[in-house]
Image: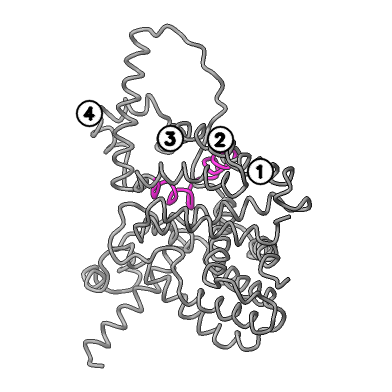
Amino acid sequence: MGVRDEQKAATREKVLVAARDLFNDVGYEETTIRAIAERAGVSVGSVFTTFASKAEVLSHVMTHRLDELYAEFDRVIPVLRGSTTDRLCSIFAIHYAFETRRVKLFLAHIAASYNPSNEAGVTPYGRNPRLSQMLVDVLAEGVRKGEVRADLDLNLLVDTLKAAYAWNYRMAAAAGGDLPAAEMSAAMDRQIAVIAEGWKPR
Amino acid sequence: MSFVSVNIEQGAETPVKLTRRALAKQRTRERVLAAARRLFSERGYEGATIRDIAQAAGMSTGAVFASFADKSELFEEILTADYEVIYAQMTQAARTAKTVDEALLGLFGVAYSFHVEQLPLLRASISVSWTRSEAAERRARNDLKHIFKLIGVALQRAVDEGQLKKDIDAKLLAEIVWDVYVANYRRAVYDGWSVEALLARLSDQLKVIFAGARA
């Protein structure tokens, strides 16, 4: 990496950290690119040479955060115990616990992802290939262990589970962002149990 | 778990003879609503200010505030009007269906057909639903009960007719059905899915959701 690239990466990192804190503490709509630049200690121009828009900054903040989470998952997944259902419940519970640490940030990300006026570079809410893969792997393991029927479309099961997972955050939105992660996990556990009833071998 | 507001039971308004003043007021409201619908679709909820809307409607911001208390009231009125248009059709579609799957595909099919035609406004309404005020949230949740009632009726009929087991948790099933219905809009927004594609996916998801509940 050349000096220029290193500088660019450092600026990027500073911008993402400043934006993450401001979006969560002050609010996404309320935060300007200027405020992000000031907090990061960089020029407004250098923010714009790295990101096309505020919406894109938010998308990058979210993927950046998920990198941390999935690094942790790489450690956790091999030691997850219990049935297929238990493991799925654990994976979602960890996600809820992680995202509710900065719930306003997360809700802003969802809102921005649906905003009709948003610019290019925005990650759609719900498109999360690493989570999908993790869930497919757990279900495939369940098939091998005889806990999940072998004739099912696992991607379709994952799609349905993820929809329930994603929209349970509406509980947090409805509570004005102030909701313990455990309440969402509990709702998710019940939803998983209902869907699991259908994939049991009979 | 709502992203739209419905306000169906407003009660029948008694027909009154409109005075010239009332007519003028009515026309002003309609002009504001038309302009607001366009701007919310183009710029999203946050991006469209009352000032912009007033300008697009060719009037002062004061005139807009004479008809609507604030931007959120204006936005909700647009969504409510839309839901009043499709609610009767959704009810009808659910009522004439033979199975629970058909009933749900019928009623959500009406909604998909309607919203896919005006995706930008739908996006704005979903977007707002994640960050709106507590008062707006309460109104929307209260209003969404109508849709959940439709789902509940379809599930109950399926139990009565022996399609679904007697001991199902209908509330929980309705929640999951709603979740997949709404989550599928992402495919329309970002992947350009047609109404047919959305319904095909929903049909598969319903099979997954009901697999353990079939009698």
Quickly name the residue at label 4. Answer: B58
Say if the magenta span includes residue B134: yes
Q: Position of residue A105 (x, y in %)?
A: 47, 63
Split into 4 quadrants, where in the image is the N terminus of chain A? bottom left
Quickly name the residue at label 2. Answer: B91
Residue B138 located left or right of residue B69:
right
Give the amino acid type for the residue marked by disc 2 in the picture: Thr
Quickly name the residue at label 1. Answer: B152
The kind of secondary structure element at disc 3 is: helix
The kind of secondary structure element at disc 1 is: helix
Among the two numbered marks 4 and 2 on one chain, the one whose residue lies closer to the N terminus? 4
Among the two numbered marks 4 and 3 on one chain, the one whose residue lies closer to the N terminus? 4
Give the amino acid type for the residue marked by disc 1 in the picture: Gly
> Residue placed at 33% from the left, 25% from the top?
B30
Is the residue marked by circle 3 packed among few (<14), some (14-19), or many (20+) residues within 10 Å? some
Residue B60 located left or right of residue B203:
left
Q: Position of residue B138 (x, y in %)?
A: 58, 41
Q: Name the chain under label 3.
A: B
The magenta segment is: B122-143
Q: Name the chain under label 2.
A: B
> Answer yes or no: do the residues labelled 4 and 2 have beta carbons within 8 Å?
no
